[in-house]
Amino acid sequence: MAEAGAAGELESARVTRILRDDIVLGRRAPGSRLVERDIAAELDVSRLPVREAIRALVAEGVVIARPRTWAVVREFTLKELQDFGEVREAIETTIFVFAAQRRTPEGLDRLRDVYEQEFAAAHAGQVEEARIAASLFHEVAAHLAANDTIFEFVSVFATRLRWLFGQHDDLIETAEEHRIILEAVEAQDAVALRALIPQHTMNAVASAARRLGVDAPPAAAP
């Protein structure tokens, strides 16, 4: 029988959420080991929900399972980073153009609110809060695009995209890029968005490459 926590959340779901956040926020580095007994002791659970959580994160593409030994946080190559950058550019350009065309007043308020959270956290030096808000900015835009197929497609890669592009250190610069994108969405300026999103993606790839210690093309000029 699956274990459940006090709030009714399955233990496996809670452990998955905690480990996912640890990975995408950089608390567990690429190549670090995920030892079932150690994580079970750390989170005060049995090894079964830890095992299920590791399986889920393998399916999400951020953990590598090694038979007869421990799992490890995935290490991405420059080629994989660039491949994800190309996919992100294509999909998110479409997302933001659709978001601009189909936005609602309530949706715009939500997007603006998330940007303001990011801006405040970035200027306060609150690294994790700024990173979380930056990721949420893209998630809200995907909802505004009002296309279930696109949202389903993005959800498949969501954890990997957050891991690759969500650990940026240039907090204020990223918030400024989001401000400009927000203004284009508000103005329903699809032409501007088709230029802004590729540049934004190129900057994110360059930032991720620096973090991973691999060579990549330089970031685009602002």
Image (spheres, helix red, strand yellow):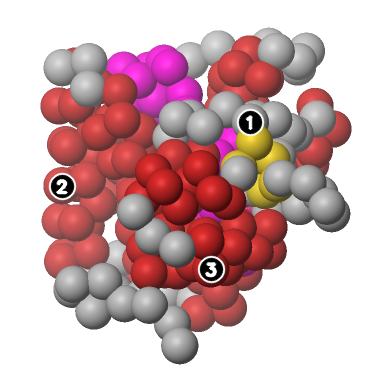
Is 167 within the magenta?
yes
Callout 3 secondary element: helix
The kind of secondary structure the magenta stretch mainly shows is helix
Q: In this rendering, which labeled residue sits more in front, label 1 or label 2?
A: 1
- Check contact, mark 1 vs mark 2: CB within 8 A: no
Q: Is residue 101 above or below residue 76?
A: below
Residue at the (31%, 77%) spot, across then down: 4
Lower position in the chain sequence, tag 2 or tag 3:
3
Q: Gap in Å between the C-alphas at discs 1 and 2?
A: 35 Å
Residue at the (80%, 38%) spot, across then down: 80
Q: Is residue 141 above or below residue 28?
A: below
Instruction: Give amino acid for label 3.
Output: Leu
Callout 2 secondary element: helix
Q: Is residue 114 above or below residue 206?
A: below
Q: Is residue 174 left or right of residue 71?
A: left
4 or 163: nearer the viewer: 4
Most distant residue in the bottom direction? 1
Instruction: Give amino acid for label 2.
Output: Asp
**Snapshot quadrant of residue 208:** top right
Instruction: Give amino acid for label 1.
Output: Ser
Q: Which numbered circle lies on residue 32? A: 1
Quadrant position of the N terminus in the picture: bottom left
- Measured as percent of width and height from the top left, residue 144 is found at 35, 66
Q: Is residue 54 left or right of residue 69?
A: left
Q: Gap in Å between the C-alphas at discs 3 and 1?
A: 20 Å
**Residue located beneath label 2 in the image:** 113
- Measured as percent of width and height from the top left, residue 139 is found at 40, 56
Q: In this rendering, which labeled residue sits more in front, label 3 or label 1?
A: 3
Q: Is residue 164 above or below residue 156?
A: above
Q: Which numbered circle lies on residue 48? A: 3
Q: Which residues are magenta?
A: 156-177
128 or 208: nearer the viewer: 128
